[in-house]
Image (cartoon, coloured by chain):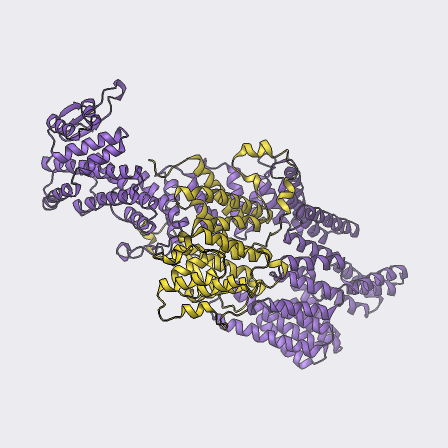
Chain colours: A purple, B yellow
Amino acid sequence: MPRNQSSEFSEHGDDSSVREVHANGLCMKTTEVEAKLDEGNILEAESSLREGLSLNFEEARALLGRLEYQRGNVEGALRVFEGIDLQAAIQRLQPFAAEKQTSRKSRSRTESPHVVSQHAASLVLEAIYLKAKSLQKLGRLSEAANECKSVLDAVERIFHQGIPDVQVDNKLQETVSHAVELLPELWKQAGCYPEAMLSYRRALLSQWNLDNDCCARIQKAFAVFLLYSGVEAGPPSLAVQVDGSYVPKNNLEEAILLLLILMRKFSLGIVQWDPSVMEHLTFALSLCSQTSVLAKQVEEIMPGVYHRIDRWNTLALCYSGAGQNRVALNLLRKSLHKHERPDDLTALLLAAKICSDDSLLAAEGVGYAQRAITTASKGVEEHLKGVGLRVQGLCLGKQAKISSSDFERSHLQSEALKSLEAALVLEPNNTDLIFELGVQYAEHRNLDAALRFAKLFVDATGGSLLKGWRLLALVLSAQQRFSEAEVVTDAALDETAKWEQGPLLRLKAKLRISQSLPLDAIDTYKYLLALVQAQRKSFGPVRSISQAEDDKDNEFEVWHGLANLYSGLSHWKDAEICLAKARESKAYSAEALQTEGIMHEKRGQIHEALSAYINALLLEPCYVPCKILISGLLLKMGPAALPVARGLLADALRIEPTNRLAWYYLGLVHKDDGRMADATDCFQAASMLEESDPVESFSSAV
Amino acid sequence: MDYQSATTPTSATAASPTGGPASKARAAIVALSSIVTAIPPSLSSSENPALALLHDPDVASQVSSLLRRPDSGSGDDNLCRWLYDTFHSGDPDLHLAVLRYVPTVAGVYLSRASQRKPHAGFECVLLAIYAHVTTARGGQSVTVTLPDVSHPSVYHETRDNSAKSIATDLNLAVVSPSLEPHGTVRSSRRSRIVGVALELYHSRIAQMPVGSKIDFCEFCVVWSGLTGDSYKDDSEEIYGGGDANPSRIEGQGTRSGRIPMPWELLQPVLRILGHCILAPAPAKEKEPLDAAAAAACRSLHARSLHDIDPKAILATGSLLRLRKIGLDSGQEVGSD
């Protein structure tokens, strides 16, 4: 920028230790002025500047103040600034603005009065800005904020239409930008949060002609303020709202909007990457449970910002948080590859956890868990060893479910228990672990241990989790202690809000059936039905799809339970009505077909029964109850059908090794075939299991 | 356990005809003086007694220690009754004076929930706050519509005008689900009720004294049941002193006070914690709060890893990294 008619302070003489003040084409050494200032003689310093550089009073003072400020003499600077009537100076700048308005059409850049006025404005505004800075440094924050605000007010009065791009000299623009950025900071430091909020909005919604970096800094600072200050901003005023544009209605929305805009600026290369923006966005979106949106942002980050492994791991967390575990697992497989970062504990644990949900992945999960245990044992995150053991136990337990041989299965099961017990030693207060041990022992049919852990879990969680109550009731039912199980269910009902009582009421109905109290069970079902229907009505038609699905499931379960009950009492008419109702909520269901088949079978309609069972298997090829029922029918059809029955039962036992009926029928098959020893074994297994059958499967408690 | 039916001296005075805000606050202070041992006389004479009460450290420490006594929180606990009555006075400043103790009430209550002792006193206070929020919100959920930056907003324009139709998929996020009224604390709703009380605390957190926030951070450590020492960003500290300490594992896992932390509780906790770490604050408050908040954040991060909870891992991890970025860049704010 050319040194021009007005004032320009330069320090480019610094190297040669000679600093100069330039103004109006004249030049003075700063040392002369400074010497006078050091003597405390402001007036003389001022007059020497006025004479030396032919400046007016305000300009000379402003220059002096800046000199003091830049020397670090904040108090001195303030004294000088306080000697100027800055408001009056601003007033004097107004005509310039008015004139500017009228001469808008015929303006030209070289028109000298404008330029001169602009420089006068620049000098005065800078003086106010520096006064604000001085006050800030002296800790007089509200005064500083008010001064700073007057800079912006002045600019708005001078430039009605916002700051024009081409017409403003750099110095003035710089002062304005600084003041715009400083004002909210000052209010923040002064503890005046509502004012800070307003000044941020003013900074971002008015036309200050800010450069990209400055604007990005303000946007980030505002987003941070919105996210964490705890002061609710309220929506922006209607004046700034444009038709069709997105208007945030609360702090969180506004902060996320600003952060997303910043992310967009990064990817367009308008401003430089700032890692903290991503972290703030991560925090905000995680709190809203919108990690899938976060994943999209992470995917859009330009290559080279994050290491690919960090990106994969973050994405895996995002997708897993959004319930897309398979996508997460695929990403983790990449990042845990031996050429990448195979020892990353968080990734290993997450991968193992995801695998523990699926029998087919469980073996892979065991591998991750073992690596996690090894890594945790030798690293700083030793406290995660227990977590590794826990997920290893879960994976082993899941793996046992699909194992093809008895030997392997029992081996895996005992390994699973060992692993979970080892984890419990490290984390005796981990309630999740206690629950998982309870389920594992129950599935292993070690009911005493299962009962102990189920009780422990209910106590440790203060009964706050439904699944604990359910597990306890199921274990008691497996021990044939039905009335106690019902007491537990009632206690659980007391602790549960109305809309969440469905599963407990179903359990209660089944417990009553087990106690041969069919009429009581019918009462329970009736109540449950009323509840389900009331629930649907009270939430109206606008419910989410998943909730609607839940409702249907609930209703189906109720009608189906009633159908079973009536069928057990040989009330065929009622049973058929209930079954039809059940099919209204779920047309294709193996359970309903099973009930239908049983009803046919009981009435001697063997072929109809068989076709219902077979249809059920076509719907769900692994549906164990129908495999057993078909075998039962085949048994009655003579020796030719025995091998088929045997095959079906073996299949059923592979899927559900603890199925008492399957063992019983297999015993019958062996007996009919004349293999007495085998038959004895099977009957023995069946009789042992009989005493340990819960009214619903243990895994339903999870 | 229902305080409403009981006529107490406080509610009688609060309802007196001269019941301006200041006289309500004075009545509350008089009532409190019969519960705690010493109340500075300056409280009642101050211009805004409710705010003086809120910010008085002596009273706060007396009340906090009473709340932490082993026999606190029962149905006949006078202090809980005072909190309940004072909250019901309807004066916003007195609300703050009660909310100030939400961290302690929630902290003590949740840590004891497994002991199966009745805590009707605590529960009444929490239910009163829950009911207040339920009424204020009309039971509605709090949602956030996530913006799509390919559309213009108040803060940006887009060049692509073809995408003017707003009907693209805006993501609707539920920040706090809808509320149904509860007359008692059913244990399965306990986390939610406390979580809602914490949501209200968070909405007033800018007015809370720093001591209350520090209390909150300390309870976070207790709730997590973990120290999270291995997440100190001062890496030398870990490698230097850590390995020689075999008792670390015990310290990590065996704290009593560990509670289940479902998302409905954890989410408001994390929002408050974000404030404690990253909100602007005067320097003299910042330092003690920052230490407590950092410890809480480390503990909750350790806990999120123990629970393998992806959302919590992301949120706590980013808080820890943000704090580190803040420390590394020094006093970024205020100097330019």
Along the line of sight, which residue is nearer the eye, A103 or A679?
A103
Q: Is residue B225 above or below residue A468?
A: above
A179 left or right of A427? left
Which quarter of the rendered picture does the N terminus of chain A lie within? top left
Tell me where residue A196 appears, x and y as whole percent: 32, 48
Q: Residue at x 56, y 67 (%)?
A: A497
Going by the picture, which residue comes out furthest to the top?
Answer: A16
Q: Is residue B167 among what the camera can see?
A: no
Along the line of sight, which residue is nearer the eye, B30 or B330?
B30
Tell me where residue B333 appears, x and y as whole percent: 36, 39
Along the line of sight, which residue is nearer the eye, B124 or A262?
B124
**Quadrant assignment, res A609:** bottom right
Query: How many marks do you count on the picture?
Result: 0
Q: Is residue A478 above or below residue A399?
A: below
Tell me where residue A320 appears, x and y as whole percent: 55, 49
Q: Residue at x 55, y 43 (%)?
A: A331
Which quarter of the rendered picture does the C terminus of chain A lie within? bottom right
Tell me where residue A408 appears, x and y as whole percent: 77, 49
Q: Residue at x 81, y 70 (%)?
A: A637
Along the line of sight, which residue is nearer the eye, A620 or B128?
B128
Q: Is residue A195 among what the camera can see?
A: yes
B287 left or right of A386? left
